Amino acid sequence: MQQLFDLAFARLDRAKEKRVEFGRMWETYISDHPWEIDLTVISETEFEFFAVQRAPAPAALSLVFSEWLATIRAALDNGFYAWVAAVTRQNPPAQAERLQYPICATSSDFKRQRSRLTSVPQEIVDMVEKAQPYQSPLGPESNLFYWVNELARTDRHRTPHIGIGRIATHKVRIKVPEGVTARFDPSVQPFQAIDDRIVLCRFTTSTPLRRSDLYGSDFRGVGIDPEIRAWAGFNMGGRRQSLRDRMVYAEIFTRRDLESMAAHSGCKPPEGFQLIDPASPPLE
C-alpha cells in the first residue's frame, strides 16, 4: 500500500505549491497599491486616518486558495483510504465509496459519521475520534482541520472565498505643527481585516488644526497581509495568526497525521518521518 501513501504525500506537496502561488499572487496585487490612505476631519481637533480599498483582490486569488483547500482536504481523505486499505489488506477496501476522513465539531456529528465507517476497523475509528476538532481543549473553532473542512465545504457547494487584506504591522507617524500634541484613541483596533474601509487611527490635537497641517504624516509602517473574509475572525487562545501561518500549520498538521497513518500501516513517507516517532505514532 506504499504507493497509496506516496500519492497522499504528493497531494500535500501540491498544497504547499498552491500556498506559494497564493503568496506570489498577493504580492503582485499589492504592488499596484490597491489601498489609499485618506483623512476624515471630525472637528477642528479630532481626526481619523483610514485605509480604503480602491481595487478588490483578483478572483484568481480566491481560486488558488480554493485549490489549496481542496488539496489539503483530499490529502487527508487519500491518507485515510490508504490506512484502511493497508490495515484490511484490501484495495479497494470494503465500501470504499463511503470512506472519507471525518472532521466533526461535535461528538454527535462523529456518531453520525460512524454509519459511513462500519467497514473500517474499530481501532482506526477510535484513533480518528481522538483527533477530532470537538476534542480540542479550546473548542472546535481553535482547530485548523475544523476550518479546512468548513471552508472547503462552502467553497465546494456555494462559492469561492473572498480574498481581502489585514493590517499586519501598524506603525503610524502623525506630523503636527511644532508645539502641538496629538493624543491617540486607544479604542481603535487596527489589527483586523480590511473589507473596503478601515480606520487606522483616531486622534485629538491640543489645538485646532487644518487638514493641510497634517500633510506629511507617515504610513510606511502600515503593512497589509492577505486574509480570507470567512476566516478573518480566527484566533488561537486569544492570539492572532496570519493567514500564511494558518496555511503553513494546516500543512504541518496534515503531514503529522499522514505520517501517523503511514506508521500505523507499516509504510513510510517518501521523504521519511519528520514529525513523529514511527515507533509510537499517535493520531490525536
Image (cartoon, rainbow, N blue to C red):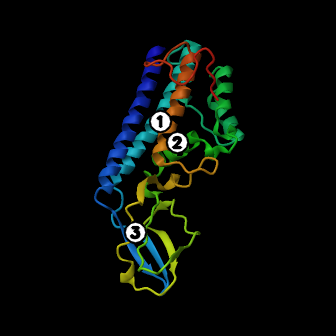
Task: Confirm or deny contact between disc 1 and disc 2 (CB under 8 A).
Answer: yes
Task: Please tell me whether mark 2 sits on a helix, a strand or a loop.
Answer: helix
Viewer-proximal residue, 40 or 260?
A: 40
Q: Which of marks 2 and 3 is nearer the N terminus?
A: 3
- In screen coordinates, is 56 left or right of 142? left
Cα–Cα gap, marks 3 and 1: 33 Å
User: Which residue position is annotated with label 2?
Assistant: 148
Question: Please, is residue 167 above or below residue 108 in the view?
Answer: below
Residue 102 location, x and y as percent?
60, 34
The disc label shown at residue 52, or none: 3
Give me the disc on residue 72. 1
In the picture, measured across the screen, residue 276 lies left or right of residue 212, that is: right
Mark 3 nearby-residue class (10 Å; few <14, some 14–19, many ≥20): some
Q: Earlier in the sequence, mark 1 or mark 2?
A: 1
Sequence order check, earlier mark of 3 and 1: 3
Neighbourhood count class around disc 2 (C-alpha, 10 Å): few under 14, some 14–19, many 20 upward:
some
User: Looking at this view, is 194 or 40 the one in front?
Assistant: 40
Instruction: Characterize the local packing of mark 1: few (<14), some (14-19) or many (20 or more) Cα atoms within 10 angstroms.
Output: many
Separation of marks 2 and 3 at Cα, in angstroms: 29 Å
Residue 37 in the image, given as x and y percentages of width and height: 38, 70
Tell whether 211 sits left or right of 266.
left
Amino acid at dot 1: Ile
Q: What element carries label 1?
A: helix
Q: Residue at x 56, y 27 (%)?
A: 257
* Quarter location, residue 66: top left
